[in-house]
Image: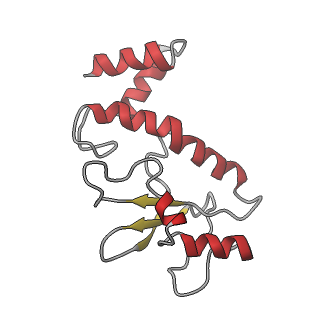
Amino acid sequence: TDTHFEEYIQTYLFPDAPPTTTQELMEFYPANISQGSPFDTGFKRIAAFQGDVTFEAPRLFLLQQRSGKQPLWTYIKRLKTVPVLGSFHGSDISSVYGGEDLAPHLVRFVNNLDPNGGTDLYWPQYTTGKPHMLEFLDGSIPQALTEDTYRVEAM
């Protein structure tokens, strides 16, 4: 509920935050189950918030701070075929060490400081003006390009 979410934020995460900040967070992470991390429950509100604070916001901050100072690439692995879990922290490891879709990009990056080459989809660099992101997908389309703008306003 709104009350549970507000209490959780005020008690465990930001006890010194003014009420206006808490209200703003509640607007960015609404109780609407169609938004946020795809869990289809009220739990998703806290999960989306914690995932952003722990993983997404620091990643996005680093990209924004280094943009224009060095070449950057970013990706997301969207698995839907792993039973019950779907995509989870660390689920992309098999793509690196198992020789799957991410491994060729990493080998090229290590050798050439550029993940592109071969017959793979061209992976454009990330910039704040063009926040390109490569999506690794399961299914008939293994890779796609998207923009790294998901919940950027909230973060």
In the rendered view, would you say 92 is above or below 39?
below
Scheme by which the image is coloured: secondary structure
**Which residue is at the front of the view, 16 or 43?**
43
- Decide if residue 77 is on the left or right side of residue 2: right
In the rendered view, would you say 21 is above or below 141?
above
Residue 111, percent across and down? Answer: 73, 75
Report the residue at 63% width, 61% height from top: 127
Image label count:
0
Q: Quadrant of residue 2?
A: top left
In the rendered view, would you say 5 is above or below 84?
above
- Decide if residue 125 is on the left or right side of residue 70: left
Report the residue at 43% width, 27% height from top: 24
From the image, which quarter does the N terminus lie in?
top left
Report the residue at 32% width, 53% height from top: 86
- Decide if residue 81 is on the left or right side of residue 70: left
Outermost right residue: 69
Q: Would residue 133 be visible to someone looking at this image?
A: no
Q: Quadrant of residue 83?
A: bottom left
**Which residue is at the front of the view, 9 or 20?**
9
Residue 122, percent across and down? Answer: 55, 79
**Which residue is at the front of the view, 44 or 88?**
88
Q: Would residue 149 be visible to someone looking at this image?
A: yes
**Which residue is at the front of the view, 131 or 82?**
82
Residue 68, percent across and down? Answer: 73, 60
Outermost bottom residue: 119
Report the residue at 49% width, 67% height from top: 98
Residue 19, percent across and down? Answer: 45, 15
